Image: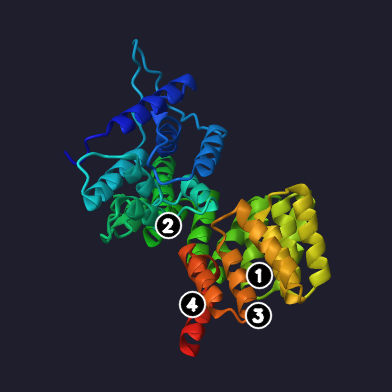
Amino acid sequence: MLLTSSYELKTAFAYARNFSLERKLFYIDSQMILLGILDSYANDIAIEHTDREKLIAWLNVLDWEKHPGISVPSGSRPKVNIMPEAERMLENAAYYQKKLGDKQLHPQHIILSLLSIENRCQYKFQQLGIVFETYLEQVRQQRGITADIPFRSPRIRSSRIPFLLPLLRLFYTKEQKKKYADRYFREAQTLLQYNEIEKCRALCGQVLQMQPDHVSALWLTGITWRVERKFKKALLYYEKVHKYHPAHTGVIAEMAHCFSELGNHAWAQHLYAHALSLNPGSAELLNSIGFECINMRQYIEAISYFDQAIAYDEECAYAYNNKGYVLMHLGFLPAAKELIIKSLEFNKGNAYAYRNLALLNLKEKNDAGAREMLLQAKRYRFSRNYGDEVDQLLMRLNTAS
């Protein structure tokens, strides 16, 4: 009974199936299931109507992947495969179904599960101000419950690495090495998605021992170190990737971010400027250069870059927020507050904007408002992305009170 689908989910799966067949994809993944839920079932899913419409629009414009090697189904009702990541998502949804005490699997369980997985859906949800904690609060309020429902990411099994693998590799042919490297890398990608950072890095290590020039494994290893905020180690791998792809703006930007976090803001600014020369008109890069200007106390230059970013992308939330921070630093508090709040209209889950509002409240001697904003920043995972500043500010406020 635990995985028995509700009528709404059956409708959503039918939508996902038709969506897949119309595009000759022949698979169903988590994003398709979410699209089916949002498009065919609008009631009682704890998402505001405008946010729901934004998610539907975003999902419809995704570049859906045509997976190579999938045979074309035959018959009047061709079979559509459910991808492994969708199966894991459903298994995790059953966990939330059990915790909420429901007899059938509902859309709310699916969304809770999606919010526990690192992927494009989770990122888009957060832009709308929806993370696991906030969505769970809405579900609790709707149902009038106080039960403890802990966060749980889907568990996956990866290949067991034989103890004698280093010795066995000596006898592998070139084709065998490529076969195992490809398999381990695919598993490493999945492990990163489900927050299994160390396992991901270990598998990438196995790939690199067989193929030292495996650029994707180098890149993924760099990401695992960046996620843990170990920027020196991340930089070592990004620099290796850069040797193979010297004009890749994403690689250059990641290197710049590492240098910035390590305190070398001048070199970070230089790298961002180089990336911008390769990709003129990038609002993201213009914002990043402006942020480095802040770090070097070049406030007028910073505002210029943020204005350029907004000119290219009028919904560039980070540029509004950062410009607001500069104006706050210069003493223009009302204008700063207006810009930071505007940034939250475009990205409701921007932890840095809540941190800036907290600083503004502290300048206005509003400790209660500052505490509320700091808690919001924590909710949107400030610590994971930016460090322990918010925790320290909360500690000081608690000590003072």
Which percent across, then down, holds residue 369? Answer: 55, 73
How are the residues colored?
Answer: rainbow
Q: Secondary structure at mark 3?
A: helix
Q: Is any part of residue 291 visible from this angle? A: no
Give the residue at mark 2: 134
Q: Earlier in the sequence, mark 2 or mark 4?
A: 2
Q: Secondary structure at mark 1?
A: helix
**Type of the residue with mark 4:** Asp
C-alpha distance separating marks 3 and 1: 26 Å
In this rendering, the answer to whether 155 lies above or below 368 is above
Furthest residue to the left? 1
What is the quadrant of residue 73 in the picture?
A: top left
**Type of the residue with mark 3:** Lys
In this rendering, the answer to whether 55 lies above or below 159 is above
Give the residue at mark 1: 260
Give the residue at mark 4: 391
Q: Nearer the viewer, mark 1 or mark 2?
A: 2
Q: Earlier in the sequence, mark 1 or mark 2?
A: 2
C-alpha distance separating marks 2 and 4: 19 Å
Quadrant where the N terminus sits is top left
Give the residue at mark 3: 363
C-alpha distance separating marks 3 and 4: 18 Å
Q: Pick whichever, 329 or 117, lies toward us.
A: 329
Tag 2 and tag 4, C-beta contact below 8 Å: no
